Amino acid sequence: MFGDIGPGELFLIFLVFMLFFGAKRLPDLAGSLGKSIREFKKGMQETQEEPQKGVEQPSTNGAARSEEKTPHAS
């Protein structure tokens, strides 16, 4: 879909952004866009790591519980 955009179209899009936002605001917009993308990626990584941590914790807790039961049973 976006693979058909050539240099002429990119220049036109950049020109439209310049008209709408002005040259002074473009660096601020680019910086906030970069921060948003970083936060999104960080959130995606955290959500992918959460299920893995959830699976590991019960096995660790189960081993600790069995160790706790052993001294009380003796």
Image: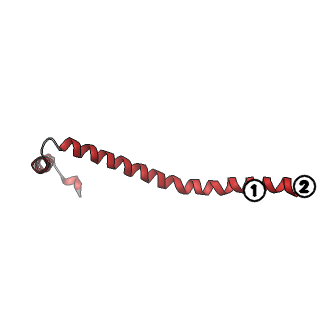
In the image, 3 versus 21, the foreground residue is 21
The image's colouring method is secondary structure
In the image, 10 versus 16, the foreground residue is 16
Circle 1 sits in a helix, a strand or a loop, which is it? Answer: helix
> Residue placed farthest to the front in the image?
72
Instruction: Compute the Cα span from label 1 to label 2.
Output: 15 Å
Q: Residues within 10 Å of mark 2 (few under 14, many from 20)?
A: few
| Amino acid marked by disc 1 | Arg
Query: Who's the residue at 37% across and 52% down the image?
Result: 40
Of the two numbered discs 1 and 2 on the same chain, state the one appearing first in sequence: 1
Query: Who's the residue at 43% across and 53% down the image?
Result: 44
Q: How many marks?
A: 2
Instruction: Please provide percent x and percent y for residue 26.
Output: 18, 44
Q: Quadrant of the C terminus?
A: bottom right
Q: Are marks 1 and 2 in contact (CB under 8 Å)?
A: no
Query: Who's the residue at 14% across and 47% down the image?
Result: 14
Determine which residue is flagged by label 2: 74
Determine which residue is flagged by label 1: 65
Instruction: Please provide percent x and percent y for residue 7.
Output: 14, 46
Please state if 59 lies on the left or on the right of 6 as rendered.
right
Q: Residues within 10 Å of mark 1 (few under 14, many from 20)?
A: few
Q: Quadrant of the N terminus?
A: bottom left
| Amino acid marked by disc 2 | Ser
